[in-house]
Amino acid sequence: MAIKICKICGTKWNFKGGALFCSDRCEEEWPQWRNRLYQVLIKPARDQLEGKTVKSPAWRNARAEIKRVQALYEEFLTTPNPSLFIQSNPELVRKMGGDYLE
């Protein structure tokens, strides 16, 4: 048995295999966190790309922004403490309005 720290609430719990969160409540909250961050990071960057001529400077800038936010989103998904990750990133706090599903 291994001791893990829940990604949502930060509680230490005995991981016995199977569930990746300490409780059903935390397991239910994780998709909300993921979806919320996707909506404020990935979707706006993807929307900037629409209507741009391929290979134009505007398209290249929008494409670079997509790659940047995708890397940030991937880091969020793999961090052991998503709440701290959001709190320590001013861009995310600003985009989420400080309301990041506590």
Image (cartoon, rainbow, N blue to C red):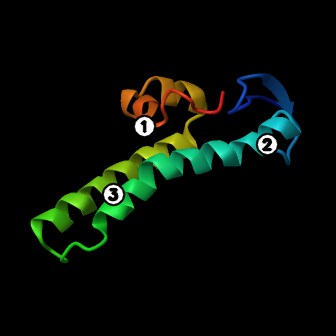
x%, y% of residue 19?
83, 45
Mark 1 and mark 2 lie on one chain; the one further toward the N terminus is 2
Query: Residue 66, labelled with which disc?
Result: 3
Q: Quadrant of the N terminus?
A: top right
Using the numbered discs, state the Cα–Cα distance from disc 2 to disc 3 in whole angstroms: 28 Å
x%, y% of residue 92?
43, 34
Which residue is farthest bottom?
54
| Secondary structure category for the residue under label 1 | helix
Query: Residue 44, labelled with which disc?
Result: none
x%, y% of residue 83?
58, 28
Q: Residues within 10 Å of mark 1 (few under 14, many from 20)?
A: some
- For marks 1 and 2, give the one nearer the viewer: 1
As drawn, 44 above or below 22: below
Give the mark count. Answer: 3
Which residue is farthest left?
57
At horizontal 46% and vertical 47% (from top left) the residue drawn is 40
Mark 3 and mark 1 lie on one chain; the one further toward the N terminus is 3
**Amino acid tagged 1:** Lys
At horizontal 41% and vertical 44% (from top left) the residue drawn is 72
Using the numbered discs, state the Cα–Cα distance from disc 3 to disc 1 in whole angstroms: 15 Å
**Amino acid tagged 2:** Glu
As drawn, 1 above or below 68: above
Query: Residue 27, labelled with which disc?
Result: 2
- For marks 3 and 1, give the one nearer the viewer: 1
Which quadrant would residue 44 be assigned to in this image? bottom left
Check disc 1 and report the residue beneath it: 95
At horizontal 78% and vertical 36% (from top left) the residue drawn is 26
Q: Is residue 35 left or right of residue 8?
A: left
